[in-house]
Image (cartoon, helix red, strand yellow):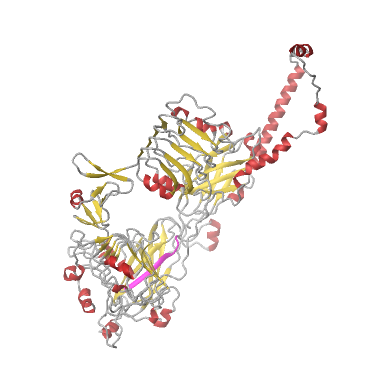
Amino acid sequence: MGHLVPRLFLCLTLALCPLLVRSENGPACGSLEINDIGDFRKLENCTHVVGHVRIAYVDFTALNLSLISFASNITEISDYLMVYRCPGLLTLESIFPRLRIIRGQALLFDEFSFVVYENRNLRELGLVELLRIQKGSIRIESNPRLCFVETVDWIFLMGNATRQHYYLKHNTPPSHCPICGSLSPDYGVNQNTSDYCWNLKSAQLRPQPPRLRNCPVACGNNGCDSAGKCCDRNCVTGCSAQNCTLCGNFKSRFGCVNQCLASYEIHKRQCITTKQCRDLGRIPLTQGYRCAEKCPGNQKEVLDAKGILHCQLDCSGDFHVTVAEDLEALQDCVKINGSLTIELTNIKVEALEVSLENIKEITGYLKVVHSGQLTSLTFLKNLDSIKGTKLVENKYALYVVNNHHLEHIWPNNHQVVVQSGSMYFHLNPRLCYEKIMALAPSLKSVQKVSVVDVSPNSNGERVICGAGVRSLNATVDDVNSTAVRILLDYMDWDGMETLMGYSYFYKEAPQQNVTMYDGRHGCGHDNWLMNVVITQSRRHVISGLKPYTQYAYFVKTLTRTDYHMQLDAYSTIGYFQTLPDRPSPVMKLHGSSELSSEILLHWWPPLRPNGVISKYVVTYEKQNVTEKQAKNYDNSSPQNFTQLDCQCVEEEPYYSGPQADDEDFYNKDQIAYEDALPNLIFVSRSQLSRVKKEFDKVIDYAHLIRTRKEEPPKPTTTTPAPTNESLENDRKAAENYEKFRLDSELSQRLAQDEGKEQYNLRHAMPKCQDSHASVGQQVEEKCVLEEILEGTQLPGNKHYYYMTNLEEASFYRVTVSACVEGVVNGCSTPTEVLLKTWSRTNRTNAN
């Protein structure tokens, strides 16, 4: 392999590199699980893996690897490659000598496309023909003898370096490993003269575009052809997407494309027409536009009038949803030819919203029982009708029983028609009776709903309903980058009588289409965050928000209730967006030098941009340091910048909502009621003796008539004519009452406005008009001087920079700062790295 390296690096056009050109046709196989030596037979006669390859717990220590060949012909893996805990394995070249691309279309843990973890004997990776890892991150960790990891240009391998990351941790330190172009085992100088290599024999294949110089700015570091047309990054083995031999995503008849449009995807790598799919004996699926061998699980094979096989959604039968796996059969269903029963045990409400959102019609019944997680049925947002061809107990088409936290039924301004049958609602303590009876007009075959069908006693007994629910007006009074102040209208007399405080609900809302019941989970892990405030103040500050983020919010009162005063209030949903702020530092820097006077610098955007990144500022200066000092440099490493050992993790706040530890948590209202009941019905003996009454024994009806006393006639009452004195007394009483009312209202308003100053938000100070303002002027005018950053300014959508006119074999200290638009001094703390230019002397000596 080593003798091919010089020729590969001299390639200016890929027409000179036949090694990179392979046949598009070849046998494909599905995902491969390799758990013992015998499983390697699965790799035979397979060139494309449509899925993943997992090699785990395979023991190579007892084998004579020189006598056994595991080499496969696999060139492509559509999803991911994982090698985990394989003792005795020395190099992956013995298994994948021809692997050229890992596409990462489905990722391990939704993140990684290439994982090599805890292989104690692994010496090198050895993927000598690998050209691209199109999507997903790379994690090579805890392989104590692994070398030639830092000598791979991972940036070059990535399809989108600003979204992909690589983690190289706890392998053999680079200082204990050979370097590219070092001595071979026979103490001769190796022919490998590249700065990037997989081992001592094999340089990393780095096919270059026709040219990098004098290309349009839009080409970036992809280069261009001789005509000045930018090379397509989607083409791995060439410049033009129209005649490419290996595409990063999909290949169609028009060239490389990111997705299959008006065509059908096959083997996760190619787009073909309907006719081509049929000619292969496969079925074109309109859902997902795939060319499949057989119909998916919830679809059935159907022949049309011409005898052509099609797949048709088969949503027939009675479906019982208890766990997430039960939703697979309902995926993409629009009409359920049968009934749907929802009885949840352990499932996220979001899963219901995704899987059941397309359902428009249920021919049988809908039954929702024993589902404490549900706060509403809005996950059936497109349901229009329940036909009722099959009924519960031969009577009910809508059957809703024993759902402790259910408080809303259908989406707002949406009604579901029930063609046949009635409805049955019982033991839903937070669902108001009025909300249920509002469904009565949608029952087309039922004239009247009785208390047997819908109980006014077992529905809504734990919440305030009807006229007791009022509207609450909440507005955004002030906002900064991390906090918002909510202002409520003054509460009236009746509301203040029972008011204890307020609950403020809020959540991130990229789109303004949120309802109160989206993502709500009655048993905890509610994705609405909640602030509970036990105060009558009409102001509240919600803090700890993300900058430059849109939020939805609503407010609810906290009230004490008794038998005479039952009031509650809700606001409508409002939206606000926090202001931008300084971004977090640029995540990572990477530099490579292939010319003695140049370094190509690459960086990842900030983890928290906190606004629109308007520009990056790059600075670099020469440093007089030695190799030893460079290795001890705190924030960098020469030529390659690797992941720091300590990585900051974004902490997410706990979801709100009750998380009970005892079985009585949800029965507190009932317990309080039972404790108060004896006091309510207790009557003292002395009081009993005063009201005690003798009852005569009734012998017969005639005796009852004789003993019944006639009630004395009530005297007629006459209202005396008002006198001047009484009119004056009434006037004074009215004046006193009005004065008392005004004084009470004033005291109530003062109570709601108490401590106004503690709800003030801090704002960034504006830029001083005078660019040379003194400290005194800044304090007096409450402004700040704008900092002018020195360095090269680049647009916010650019993540690389060529540093030119540098000195050979010299170290440079490089910093990159990200700046947010519209923020005074809105640039991040600079991220820095120490990089070294290439040395022609070392290369000459190596040759």
Whether residue 728 is visible, yes or no, is: yes
Find residue 36 and report its horizontal and vertical position in percent: 35, 69
How far across and how far down the image is residue 454, in percent?
A: 53, 31
Q: Residue at x 40, y 40 (%)?
A: 318
843 to 466, vertically: above or below: below
Tell me: 266 left or right of 544: left
- Residue sitting nearer the eye, 804 or 530: 530
Q: Nearer the viewer, residue 238 or 634?
A: 238
Residue 598 at what x, y percent from top left? 30, 74
**Residue 68 position in % (x across, y down):** 28, 76
Looking at this rendering, what residue extends furthest in the bottom direction?
187
> Magenta region: which residues?
583-592
The answer to whether residue 59 is left or right of residue 703 is left
Q: Quadrant of the C terminus?
A: bottom left
Q: Is 146 a magenta residue?
A: no
Quarter-of-image position of residue 432:
top right
Which quarter shows the N terminus? bottom left
- Left or right of 645: which side holds 83? left
Q: Does residue 411 appear in the picture of this structure? A: no
Q: Quadrant of residue 341?
A: top left
- Seen at 36% across and 77% down, the residue is 62
